[in-house]
Amino acid sequence: MRRAPRKSMTTGRSIRTVSLILAIGCLAGCDFLASPVRQPRVIVTSSQVRANRRLFDGAPPVIPHAPLNITCTECHTASGKEAPPLGYAPANPHAKTSGISGTRYCQQCHVFRRQEELFRENDFGGLAQQFGKADRLHPGAPPVIPHRLFMRENCTACHSGPVARPEILCRHIDRKNCRQCHVPVMSHDTPSLAAL
């Protein structure tokens, strides 16, 4: 005598389990149940403050904090890092510089500010930093790169992330090859704009 096939209980349990998992997943994605994500304490430094940290346009900025007894790249990574209690350490724009290395010799160019007055009076007059918008070939064209590229190969260091200034913030950083559309200025009339 044959038995009638009985319904599998595991199928019913599987459907209930999947339904329960989906319901939990939907609830977990809701804003009112999601745990708040702590944002780093970010203070975006104005263009003028950043310009004041340079002797002239194109000069390396001074280090705006006291020595921390760690290597610079522990905080100034390729994408930047939260560095309490100082705030957010900007990304290292030299991380992709070949032959020089973005991880060594930072203080060969960047120095700590020891005093506010000039070391020695002089008549040197460097170029002032230009805050205007970059030129375009025509309206709607991508802007040209208005600065040198050497030691600034990491475009995302300045143009993305929590410390990027709003006027130069890139809204399409997911496009990985910046120079496919943006080309450097090739004018040698203005030394601050001459690209290498």
Image (cartoon, rainbow, N blue to C red):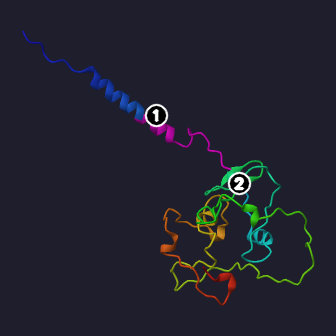
Please say if 71 is above or below 188.
Answer: above
Q: Which mark is residue 48?
A: none
Which residue is the site of mark 1? Answer: 24
Most distant residue in the bottom direction: 189
Which residue is the site of mark 2? Answer: 88
Most distant residue in the left direction: 1
Q: Determine the residue positioned at 88% across, 84% down.
A: 123
Rounded to the nearest angstrom, the CA distance separating label 1 from label 2 is: 35 Å
Most distant residue in the front direction: 99
Q: Residues within 10 Å of mark 1 (few under 14, many from 20)?
A: few
Q: Position of residue 152 (x, y in %)?
A: 62, 69
Q: Position of residue 7 (x, y in %)?
A: 21, 20
Q: Quadrant of the N terminus?
A: top left
Q: Sequence order check: which comes first, mark 1 or mark 2?
A: 1
- Amino acid type, label 1: Ile
- Amino acid type, label 2: Tyr
Q: Which residues are magenta?
A: 22-40
Instruction: Give the quadrant of residue 156.
Output: bottom right
Give SS at disc 1: helix
| Callout in the foreground (1, 2) | 2
Please say if 143 is above or below 154.
Answer: below
